[in-house]
Amino acid sequence: MRNALKLTLLVCCFTWRHAPAQTPPCAPLGRNLIVNPDFEQGYYGFTSDFGRGVNNGTHCGCATQGWILVTNIFPHVSPSCQIYPLEWSALYGGPNTETSPDPNHPSNTSVVTTAICNEPLPDHTTGSSFFLTIDPDACDARAYWRQGLHVCPNTNYYFSVWVRNISGTPAPTFHFEVDGVPVTPAATYPDGFWVESSALWNSGNLDGTVSLELINDLPGCIANDVAIDDLFFGVCGGIVLSGDSLFRFCPGDPALSVALSGHALGLAQPQYQWQKLDAGHWADLAGQTDTLLHISSPTSADAGWYRLIAAEQGNIDAATCTVISPLMRLEAYPSYDIVDTVNICQGETYGGHTETGLFTKRFQTALSCDSIRTLDLRVQGDVNIYMPNVFSPNDDGLNDRIHANFSEGRIDLFHWQVFDRWGSLVFDTRDAAQAWDGSARGKPCAAGVYVYTLLLEIRGCQRSWIVGDVTLVR
């Protein structure tokens, strides 16, 4: 379809030389909007007026011409070796066949070749991966490659493609079109090595999806074969940072202020929006639409990744029309608010303190962040111990058992032993909750006076050896 709207060509430039690539007239560039630009996903993302593989060519009066191949070998050692499977051709491989949304679908698979025919041809991307080769036929104005792309109005775009002549003379000749309207004049590519061809195009008042095409200008049945790789189409512009990309800070410093800044290049009337990475998604920062993002007294919540995006006025909400700054990061140094609880015994000292209380000390970490350490000091006092001196184990529910009683505190060590008047051990326990019921080895003890010893350590401080007696009444 030819669009009646006027398309403005700003710059058209072609070079034929080895890498490094020519410098774009609008460096830096936005992200590449082309899907599968290096053909590593096979036939995914684009269409062509030529069929896939020799067996699916559209001849226009030629014997075997009119096909494309995504391959990584020299395609003309023997054309009969370049077979796109017949069963796939019938289902997926005709001219202008739409690709599946799944890059791994058979319709998107690269060429199947016979090993004895292989002769490697370095691609432009890595030297060992895929590219697209085209063997044109005698039909006029047929598209090597075509892809629909979203554009925004009043925006400069840069388009480039790496080209290689793979058949000698006559050399391949083609031009760029947008929606059927030529953007560049026909250019010829005689070199047998990779060269870059590029153009700068302004979208004018176009807003939406356009068809970008490479159109053959040398129909014929002999030679004119070409390989293409690493296509690029993106906004002609970018964002450069005006300051550092990494800031480290101590949270909560009232005197601290952090400023992130950047500005757009190549945009006539840039519109800005700051964003912060939140749970894996870039979220707009409300009201932050200037080249400077100012954060006063940053807290730990402000730490994270930031970026600045820009577009021509009115296009900031269209992701395909924005340019993105390098990432900026805020890192919060750790600071501490520590509470240490310490128990000491009476008469002891800890940190110069001898009494119960809360003691606060401010300090700076190795990274110079203010921190607080609080000491909760507890001095353990004396514990009162009470042991009855008489009991009557007669099962009347009154004073039938005897045990030690403590006013407070934890018992770290307890050992209670009871002896009869001849010094025989009649009761032994290390359980402070266990009581003596006046029996020994399962039999009631006789009435009389019994001597006991009690070894105690309370709260790690008070250790006592107590000797006393108790009267058993029957």
Image (spheres, helix red, strand yellow):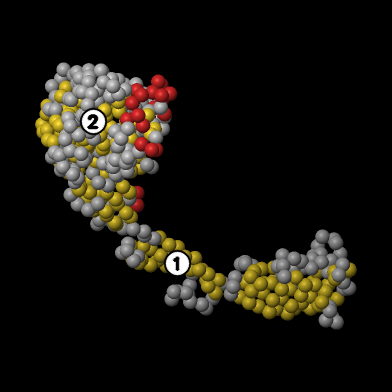
Q: Nearer the viewer, residue 472 or 436?
A: 436
> Dot 2 corresponds to which residue?
225
Q: Earlier in the sequence, mark 1 or mark 2?
A: 2
Quadrant of the rendered image containing residue 441:
bottom right
In this view, the mark in front (1 or 2):
2
Residue 10 location in percent, x, y? 10, 31
Q: Is residue 119 left or right of residue 346?
A: left
Q: Nearer the viewer, residue 325 or 439?
A: 325
Q: Is residue 74 left or right of residue 467?
A: left
Residue at figure coordinates x 73%, y 79% from the top left = 467
Let me know if residue 375 appears in the view: yes
Q: Is residue 418 above or below residue 63?
A: below
* Residue type highlighted by circle 2: Asp
Residue at figure coordinates x 22%, y 46% from the top left = 293
Q: Classify the position of the C terminus by image quarter.
A: bottom right
Q: Classify the position of the N terminus by image quarter.
A: top left
Let me know if residue 234 appears in the view: no
> Dot 1 corresponds to which residue?
375
Residue 387 is labelled as: none
Packing grade of label 1 (10 A; few <14, some 14-19, many >=20) is many
Q: Is residue 401 above or below residue 301?
A: below
Residue 148 location in percent, x, y? 27, 26
